[in-house]
Image (cartoon, rainbow, N blue to C red):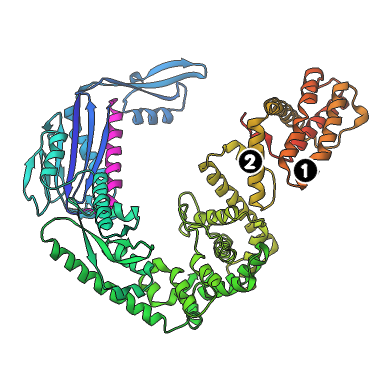
Amino acid sequence: MAELLVELFSEEIPARMQRPAAKSFLASVLGRLEALGLTWDNVRTYTTPRRIAICIDKLPHDIPERTEEKRGPRVDAPEKAIEGFLRSAGLETLDDCERRETPKGAFLYAVTTTPGGPLRDVLPEVVLDSVRELVWPKSMRWGEGTFRWVRPLHSVLALFDGAPLEGELDLGDRTIPFGDRTEGHRFLSPGRFEVADFKSYETGLREAHVVLDAAEREALIHEQATALARKAKLALKDDPALLAEVAGLVEWPVVLIGTFEPEFLEVPQEVLIETMRGNQKYFALMDPDGKLSNRFVIVANMPDDRDHIVSGNERVLRARLSDARFFWQQDLKLTLDARLPRLKEITFHEKLGPVADRAARLKNLAENIAGTIGANPVQACRAAELCKADLVSDMVFEFPEVQGIMGRYYALAQGEPDEVAQAVAAHYAPAGPSDACPSAPVSVALALAEKLDTLAGFFAVDLKPTGSKDPYALRRAALGVIRLILENDLRVDLGALFDDAIAEYVGQNCAAVPAGGTARAKIRADLLAFFDDRLRVMLRDQGDRHDHVSAVLSVDTGGDLVRKIARLKALTAFLDGSDQAESLLTAYSRAANILKAEEKKDGKRYDGAVTPTALSAPDEKALYQALQDADAVIGPFLDKEDDAAALAAMAGLRAPLDAFFDNVTVNADDAAVRTNRLTLLAMIRRTMDRIADFSKIEG
């Protein structure tokens, strides 16, 4: 068994592109090896700022002989179909095909045998094809533009079983031969060294001041930074995304601490943190009270002249913080109310008008929602009026990431109540699955209004998500609404909320939004269906059984999400904890299957009323009475939202159902009797489907 090691060495690769590129390159190589009929033991990817590398263990030395079969058209197929099959299979005449009899007739088969051979002979092409196939978000062209790579590519290390592969990468204007040498740290260990296998590769790089494993670099950075922070009696602000990015910027991480002037702490700490992490890739340090310290962590790529590195970074940060403080001081000279007219200059969307119109819609929506969920309508209205005003502030123009957050600071500065200021800060939340969900009533009202307005507007102008494309983040907005409702246990009707949101656009005479009742009903229905899909995804991710979810969502419980979840929990508890559930489901399925077959054959549904006087067999009379009794109590239980009691009442149908199917023939010779018994089966389906669509349950 042999080891394959490949390294692609270049100028600095953007940190965010390194790991995806390594995974993509490995997947491409493995796909080609699998197509050769090969197996392997262990695979690894590695990245540094200047390289991506893969290592595949325990590959065989030889490729086995492979036989591939491809079934073609029938022997008597049209001539053109047969010619097309021969071309696709690389065959010249029909004599090169096999004719085989199958239960469906005689077919042509193309059987191709590929001889085996040394794996070393084909590996160069495997590597070259995988390099050429690699797609970067942004890339550069070489030669005549036929080769693309993210940065200038310098060398390709390709070793199989300890020896370099024979091959070269054609860049158009030059070629890069495969080799067995690589480079270490650009400054600390310049020059190239020879590699014999992965062990010598990793060891040689470490001796040349390169930590090959990005995860190890992350751990080193975190460990050093935490130790320095603890020594300074501070705490490192947790920031996994920044840690991963910085690990992609350095090969030999050295962690240092810098300081900025305390007077900059007058600027909101969110701005200071964003300035440090976004522009300079520094880590924030927090004091024991949880407030931002005036010290920060720098990650350098070399240990020499540390004092100079720290002072240089402090000088750069000082200039950035001076800008931030200037923006802060300038913004405080103007109230949020004074900024509102400028919202007319910002377009929300070309079909949906300016942000000023959006703010007006949010005022009405937030006020209405507040009245529904027990929030203060006046405060919700005021928060909605101000929530977009910080978009025209200098600070948000420079740092878009702090929109909403800055609105809170400006609202407090002009004397707004805490509830209003907090709602302004939280109105975009939750922005993702890991984002905290607002719980303060005014904040919830405004956050709901913001997302409902977005969803209603884009659905109204038919800019819904398609496939994997969701340019307006509508799936995220829908999940945000679902979380706001469920985590705050809000008993609201989504359909009514969407009606209000659409009506706001119509009331503003938004030309792109249809005003007709039929069109608006269609938008509402599309939105509710979209939310059911999002709810399915969320519940599936939480571990709920998909068939239980489908069973509940297939029954109309209106737009009350809390009600849907409560019923789902009751149904799952019933099906998982009741001895009667399995036989009840079996009986339901038997009734539903008979009905489905007979209704298809007869071309009609048996949804009418049962004729009691036509019931003759004791067991069908008993079932009819049991269904009437169950129906009489299930309805009131459902009205009281006691799903567990309704399911328990339904469980009482088990015995009469079993007796009916054991002793009664549904398809009787007498047509009237048969019709009445099929109608009785439909009564079973109708009674049980009031709770959930049991045909969706997989058992």
Instruction: Give the residue drawn at x 57%, y 53%.
Output: 487
Q: Would you call the spot at circle 2 few (<14 residues within 10 Å), some (14-19), or many (20 or more)?
A: some
In the image: residue 687, left or right of residue 56: right
Instruction: Give the residue drawn at x 33%, y 20%.
Output: 96
Tell me whether circle 1 and circle 2 mark residues in contact (CB < 8 Å).
no
370 shown above or below 197: below
Q: Amino acid at mark 2?
A: Lys
Q: Nearer the viewer, residue 247 or 400?
A: 247
Magenta-drawn segment: 13-39
In the image: residue 47, left or right of residue 478: left
60 shown above or below 423: above
Instruction: Give the residue drawn at x 7%, y 51%.
Output: 190
Q: Amino acid at mark 1?
A: Phe
**Percent x, y for residue 153?**
16, 50
**Percent x, y for residue 323?**
30, 76
Q: Which mark is residue 247?
A: none
- The residue indicated by pointer 2 is 569
Q: Quadrant of residue 661?
A: top right
Q: Nearer the viewer, residue 636 or 671?
A: 636
Q: Would you call the spot at circle 1 few (<14 residues within 10 Å), some (14-19), or many (20 or more)?
A: some
316 shown above or below 594: below
Disc 2, SS? helix
Disc 1, SS? helix
